[in-house]
Image (cartoon, rainbow, N blue to C red):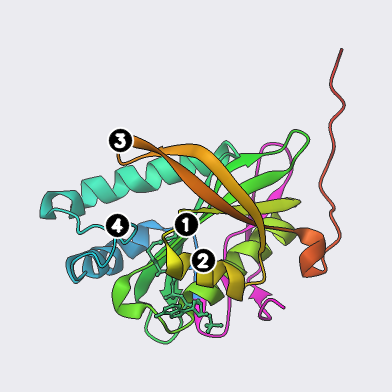
Amino acid sequence: MAPKTWAVESRFWFSDGYSLMKQRRGKRLTVRPLAARDYLVWKQAHTELPPQKNIWDQKIKPIQDLSKIKFREILKSQKALADSDKYLDFSVFLNATGELIGHVALMDIVRGISHSAFLGYRIFNPHWGKSYGKEAVALAIQIAFKDIKLHRIEAGIEPSNRRSIMLARALGLRKEGLKKRAIFLRNQWVDLTIYSATCEDFGIKWQGKTKDRLR
Ligand SMILES: CC(C)(COP(=O)(O)OP(=O)(O)OC[C@H]1O[C@@H](n2cnc3c(N)ncnc32)[C@H](O)[C@@H]1OP(=O)(O)O)[C@@H](O)C(=O)NCCC(=O)NCCS
């Protein structure tokens, strides 16, 4: 069962009428789009990152990529993708300190006949093993099913990514099988184990819109 969350009353709207809560606040974390006011917090989080602990971990950014100009480019790109209803990036903040500790995303959003998206998630390694990944992804799932009315979310996980598989299992996602040569990563096609859920699995009735196609 997903942790209880509550939503802050501010929304923006996609062109097709779906509303998106700007943020979801959980017990210890808030998940929301990065905003201009976050520059210093973002820079500090990336400046203090320890070396990568595995190939999926956040890479240290070179100092020139931490400028205000680069940050604005990131905001602009995230906003453009959100406005096109294709990809939603969220940053994960600690409620107690306001510290930025990772990211979650709803990627490759498809309305069409599947109303689905891929889940992306990353917690910065000093914060691993404290159930933050679990809380952050649970909040992203609430946004996916309640706010933007998706029906299905899928996590595509490389079979050797044990921590991510443990996280998917801890959230109650269902193992669906191995998708062969699913995505192009690190200069090669890699297999992904798919873990998924539909809104019904979280006790949420699907309330999206269907569109009739002209023939
Ligand atoms: C995968 C990742 C997000 C997990 O974040 P996290 O905050 O450490 O995860 P959590 O602490 O919420 O742990 C989730 C579950 O994993 C398991 N787990 C926690 N620590 C673990 C460890 N050291 N070893 C194995 N399993 C562990 C537990 O079952 C836990 O569930 P619980 O909290 O109910 O006990 C994080 O390791 C990460 O960012 N990795 C790099 C990016 C990445 O791999 N992204 C996913 C790509 S598909």
From the image, tell me which residue sits under label 3.
187
Residue at x 31% of width, y 73% of height: 125
Mark 3 Cα within 10 Å, few/some/many (few <14, many 20+)? few
**Label 4 to label 3: alpha-carbon separation:** 13 Å
Amino acid type for the residue under numbered disc 2: Ile
Q: Indicate the position of residue 29 as horizontal and vertical percent values.
A: 50, 78
- Residue 43 at x, y = what percent? 23, 63
Q: Determine the residue positioned at 53% across, 71% down.
A: 167
- Indicate left or right for 81 with 98 as reference: right
Element at badge 2? helix
Is residue 130 depicted above or below 159 in this figure?
A: below
Residue for badge 4 = 55
Q: Is mark 1 within 8 Å of ligand 1?
A: no
The amino acid beneath tag 1 is Pro
* Magenta stretch holds residue 16: yes
Element type at marker 4? loop
Q: Main secondary structure of the magenta part?
A: loop
Check the picture and name the quadrant holding the N terminus: bottom right
Front-lying residue, 206 or 98: 206
Alpha carbon separation for disc pair 1 and 4: 13 Å
Distance from label 3 to label 2 (Cα)? 23 Å
Task: Identify residue type, mark 4.
Answer: Ile
Q: Which residue is mark 2?
A: 165
Q: Is residue 211 left or right of residue 155?
A: right
Q: Nearer the viewer, residue 110 or 129?
A: 129
Q: Which residues are magenta?
A: 1-29
Quarter of the image that includes the C terminus: top right
Q: CA distance from mark 4 to mark 2?
A: 15 Å
Q: Is residue 55 magenta?
A: no
Name the image quarter holding residue 97. Answer: bottom left
For mark 1, give the secondary structure: loop
